Amino acid sequence: MAFNKDQFRSLVYRTLEKIGLHSMSAENLLLGTAAQESGFGTYFRQIGCGPARGVFQMELATEKDIWENFLCFKDKELWNKIFIITGITEPDPLALEGNLIYQIAMCRVHYLRVREALPNWADIEGMARYWKQYYNTFAGKGTEEEFINNYRRYLG
């Protein structure tokens, strides 16, 4: 069963505000990522025993890379903000699967590391391209068309 879109949007908004990384573009991109990756909260583990976890289906290696190569060395202030709202100080596979606030923060930090600016908040096609290039990657099985369809399905 998928999330209530208004409640999940509110949680995304409040989490991003707390870590100082909110914008409408970031909010909508994360909502679209959840719609595409997990059926908007339907799945917490990758189907077929894969390594991805949580509503954003982040892989454990990606989570580890965010901590080791970004938060611990390049952005201690953001590390502290994430600690304050989650209590987490290092990669945590259980939290990546079950702690929504942590998952939201990790997904946003993943996109934060991309040099290209986020797409416009209302540009679903642009968000689909951005997600495909920087989150799912060209090696991933997801498509831009799926992203667009799932965005519309779960978010209207």
Image (cartoon, rainbow, N blue to C red):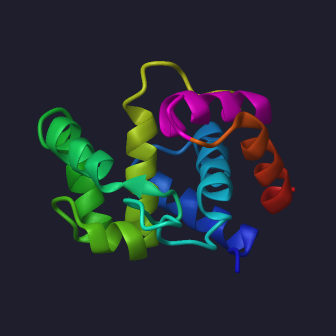
Give the residue displayed 48% in from the left and 58% down from the top: 57
Above or below 117: residue 50:
below
**Horizontal placement of 10 versus 104: left or right?**
right
* Residue at 15% across, 43% down: 68
Give the image location of residue 128, x and y in percent: 69, 35
- Residue 133 x %, y %: 55, 27
Out of 142 and 118, give the one closest to the viewer.
Answer: 142
Is residue 85 found left or right of 119 in the rendered image?
left
Q: Residue at x 50, y 31 (%)?
A: 134
Up-down: is 34 above or below 71? below
- Closer to the camera, 15 or 114? 114
In the image, residue 77 above or below residue 127: below
Instruction: Say how many tags the image has.
Output: 0
- Range of residues picked out in magenta: 123-140
Residue 93 visible in the shown view? yes
Judged by its main secondary structure, the magenta piece is helix
- Residue furthest toward the bottom? 1
The quadrant of the image that shows the C terminus is bottom right
Task: Tell me which residue sits at (59%, 33%) in the image.
Answer: 132
Q: Tell me where residue 80 sits by quadrant.
A: bottom left
Tell me if 9 is positioned left or right of 152 in this view: left
Quadrant in which the N terminus appears: bottom right
**Residue 136 is one of the magenta-drawn residues:** yes
| Camera-nearest residue between 15 and 149 | 149
Place of residue 40 in the rendered image (x, y in percent of width and height, measured from the top left): 66, 65
Residue at the outermost front position: 48
| Residue 77 position (above or below residue 59) | above
Residue 70 placement: quadrant? top left
Based on the picture, tell me whether residue 97 belongs to the magenta stretch: no
| Residue 55 picture location, percent across and down | 53, 64
- Is residue 18 visible to us here? no
